[in-house]
C-alpha cells in the first residue's frame, strides 16, 4: 500500500525492513492484479505472528536498555523546485533565493537526502539528488550563483515530473517531500486553454496520485501574480501546506518553516536571548533573523568568550535577513546571544542525547485525528530502560486556531514503552486553521523542544478548489473567444463576397450570350457547350 501519515508503527527493525519491502513491492506493482501478487508464497510453515513473537523476545533479551532505531523514524528526503522565470526579476530583484537556499544547505541534517531543480520553460538539475554530507553541501554551495531569471515560462508540470523521477522506486526508508517556489502560474505554451488544461491535469490526476503515495507538495507563492488558488489546491490535495511570501524578504523564514515540516529537528529553548547547553552537546547552530536596521550579532559563552562574524573561531554566514553560526564542542552552561536587532532566534544542537519525533501530517481534514511517535535517543538508539525514561519529563503543548491550549503530559499519562517509542494521540482537529504543537523534553540541565504545526482544512472548500478547475483567467478567455469570433466572421464575409462575385460574373456571361443570340437571328445558341435548341416551333425555350 502507499505510505500514509496515519500508518501504524512497526516496532522491530527487521520487521520494519520486511514491511518496507512489502510496501515497496506494492508501490512498484500497485497496478498488477492481486492474483499475480498472491502467487508468491513463503516456504516457511511458521505463522507470521509466531515469527514476530520469537524475534521480539530475542530483541528484548539482547537489548535491555536501548532499541535499535535506524528504521524507527523515516529520514527526510527534500526535493526543492525553484522558479527562474523572467518575472522573478520583479518578484525577487535582489535574488534572495540564494541566501534562503544557503540556509537550507547548512541546516539540512546529515544523512537526509535532497535535490534542487530550477525551472522555466524547461527543467534543469541544479544540485543532484543525493545523500546530504560534506560533498553534497560543497556541490550545492558551488552552484548558488546559477539561480537566475533566465526562464521564459513556468513549466510546473515538468518540474513536478523531474522531482519525482524515481516515483516507481522510492526508498521506503525516507519520507519524501516536495517544496515548490514560484511567482506565477502554470505556463507551458501560448494558449490559455492549454495552460488551464495543464493546471487541471495536475490537480485532478498528479496531485491525488502524490497524495495517495504520501508525498506532500508544499507550495510557496512569491508574489501576488502567483496563482494562489492553484498552489493552495495542489498543497491541500497532497497533504502539504501553501504559504504566501508578501515580499522576497520573507522567503528565508518560509524556507525555514518548510524545512521544519520536511525535517523536524529538536532545538534548545531560548528565553531573553539566553539558552543553556548541556554536556551532551557536540555542536550548536544558532540562526538569528534580523529586524530592519541593526544586523550586529555575537555569542558569549559561559566563560565569557565572544564568538563574532569577524573572527575565525566559528563557521558564520551573514546576510541582510539572517545570520547563521555553527560552533563545535560548545562549552556547557548558559550562553548569551548579543543581537539587539534579533527578531527570532533558533538554536539546534548535535548531541548524543536527542529527541526524535515522527511528524504529524502537514495538513489534514477537520474532524480527524493523528498519532505521533516520540523517542528519546542516545547515540542513535531509543532509550528503553524505564528507570532512565523516568528521569525525563516529556510533554506536548497544543495550541488550536482559536488560541485555546492543551498540554499532554506524556511521561505521566503514558507508561514507559518497551521499545522506547511513545505513541501519542493528538486531540481531534475540530477547528479549521493552523494547530501548533510544541514537544518538550526536560531533565536537569537538558532542555529540548521541537515545534510542529498542522493545517486543518474544511473538506468542502478543498473539494471545490480541486475539481472545479476555474483557474483560467476570465480576461484571457474572453479575449480568446473574441479573437475566434472575429476570425470566423471574417472568413464568412470573404466566402460570401467570393460567392456573390461569382454569381454576378455568371449573370454577366448569360446576358452577353443572350444578346449575341438575338443579334445573330438564330433559333439556337450555345451555353458553355450545351445546346439549347427548340424541340418544336410552338414550344418556347426555357
Image: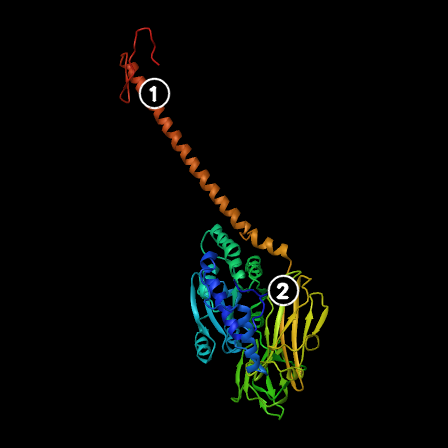
Residue at mark 2 = 455
Residue at mark 1 = 511
Residue 257, image quadrant: bottom right
- Which callout, 1 or 2, points to the residue nearer the camera? 2
Q: Is residue 319 visible?
A: yes
Front in this rendered view, residue 241 or 497 = 241
| Rendered location of residue 444, percent (x, y) | 67, 86
Q: Give the vertical position of 68 relative to 233 (above or below).
A: below
**Secondary structure beneath label 1:** helix
Q: Is residue 201 left or right of residue 506?
A: right
Front in this rendered view, residue 366 or 494 = 366
Q: Is residue 72 visible?
A: no
Q: Is residue 8 left or right of residue 507?
A: right
Label 1 CA crowd tier, 10 Å (few <14, some 14–19, many 20+): few
Front in this rendered view, residue 334 or 377 = 377
| Rendered location of residue 365, percent (x, y) | 63, 60
Q: CA distance from mark 1 to mark 2?
A: 84 Å
**Secondary structure beneath label 2:** strand
Residue 129, image quadrant: bottom left
For the C terminus, which image quadrant? top left
Q: Residue at x 33, y 12 (%)?
A: 541
Q: Residue at x 62, y 84 (%)?
A: 337
Amino acid at each position: 500500500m502507499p505510505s500514509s501519515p496515519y500508518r501504524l508503527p512497526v516496532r522491530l527493525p527487521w520487521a520494519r525492513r520486511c514491511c518496507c519491502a512489502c510496501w515497496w513491492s506494492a508501490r512498484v506493482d500497485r497496478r498488477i492484479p492481486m492474483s499475480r501478487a498472491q502467487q508468491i508464497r513463503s516456504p516457511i510453515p511458521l505463522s507470521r505472528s509466531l515469527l514476530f513473537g520469537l524475534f521480539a523476545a530475542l530483541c528484548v533479551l539482547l537489548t535491555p536498555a536501548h532499541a535499535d532505531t535506524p528504521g524507527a523514524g523515516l529520514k527526510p528526503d527534500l526535493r526543492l523546485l525553484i522558479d527562474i522565470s523572467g518575472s522573478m526579476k520583479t518578484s525577487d530583484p535582489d535574488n534572495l533565493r540564494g541566501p534562503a537556499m544557503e540556509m537550507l544547505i547548512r541546516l539540512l541534517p546529515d544523512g537526509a537526502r535532497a535535490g534542487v531543480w530550477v525551472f522555466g520553460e524547461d527543467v534543469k538539475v541544479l544540485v543532484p539528488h543525493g545523500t546530504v554530507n560534506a560533498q553534497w553541501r560543497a556541490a550545492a554551495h558551488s552552484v548558488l550563483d546559477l539561480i537566475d531569471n533566465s526562464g521564459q515560462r513556468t513549466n510546473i508540470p515538468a518540474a513536478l515530473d523531474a522531482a519525482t523521477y524515481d516515483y516507481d522506486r522510492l526508498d521506503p526508508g525516507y519520507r519524501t517531500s516536495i517544496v515548490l517556489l514560484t511567482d506565477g502560474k502554470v505556463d507551458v505554451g501560448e494558449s490559455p486553454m492549454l495552460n488551464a488544461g495543464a493546471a487541471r491535469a495536475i490537480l485532478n490526476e498528479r496531485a491525488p496520485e502524490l497524495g495517495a503515495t504520501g508525498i506532500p507538495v508544499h507550495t510557496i507563492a512569491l508574489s501576488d501574480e502567483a496563482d494562489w488558488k492553484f498552489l493552495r489546491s495542489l498543497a491541500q490535495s497532497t497533504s502539504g501546506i501553501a504559504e504566501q511570501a508578501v515580499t522576497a524578504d520573507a522567503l528565508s523564514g518560509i524556507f525555514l518553516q518548510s524545512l521544519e515540516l520536511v525535517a523536524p529537528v529538536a532545538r534548545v529553548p531560548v528565553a531573553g536571548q539566553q539558552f543553556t547547553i548541556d554536556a551532551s552537546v557536540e555542536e550548536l547552530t544558532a540562526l538569528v533573523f534580523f529586524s530592519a536596521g541593526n544586523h550586529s550579532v555575537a555569542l558569549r559563552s559561559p566563560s565569557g568568550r565572544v564568538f563574532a562574524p569577524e573572527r575565525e573561531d566559528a563557521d558564520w554566514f551573514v546576510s541582510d535577513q539572517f545570520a547563521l553560526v555553527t560552533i563545535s564542542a560548545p562549552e556547557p552552561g548558559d550562553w548569551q546571544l548579543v543581537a539587539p536587532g534579533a527578531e527570532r532566534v533558533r538554536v539546534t544542537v548535535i548531541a548524543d542525547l536527542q529527541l526524535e519525533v515522527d511528524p504529524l501530517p502537514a495538513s489534514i481534514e477537520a474532524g480527524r485525528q493523528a498519532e505521533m511517535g516520540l523517542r528519546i535517543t542516545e547515540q542513535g538508539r531509543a532509550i528503553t530502560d524505564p528507570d532512565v525514561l523516568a528521569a525525563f519529563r516529556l510533554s506536548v503543548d497544543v495550541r488550536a486556531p482559536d488560541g485555546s491550549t492543551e498540554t499532554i503530559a506524556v511521561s505521566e499519562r503514558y507508561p514507559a514503552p518497551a521499545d522506547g517509542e511513545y505513541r501519542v494521540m493528538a486531540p481531534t482537529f475540530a477547528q479549521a486553521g493552523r494547530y501548533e504543537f510544541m514537544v518538550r523534553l526536560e531533565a536537569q540541565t537538558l532542555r529540548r523542544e521541537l515545534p510542529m504545526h498542522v493545517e486543518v482544512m474544511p473538506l468542502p472548500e478543498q473539494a471545490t478548489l480541486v475539481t472545479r478547475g476555474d483557474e483560467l483567467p476570465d480576461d484571457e478567455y474572453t479575449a480568446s473567444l473574441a479573437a475566434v469570433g472575429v476570425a470566423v466572421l471574417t472568413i464568412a464575409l470573404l466566402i460570401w463576397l467570393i460567392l456573390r462575385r461569382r454569381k454576378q460574373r455568371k449573370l454577366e456571361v448569360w446576358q452577353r450570350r443572350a444578346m449575341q443570340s438575338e443579334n445573330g437571328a438564330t433559333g439556337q445558341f450555345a451555353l458553355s457547350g450545351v445546346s439549347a435548341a427548340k424541340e418544336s416551333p410552338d414550344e418556347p425555350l426555357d
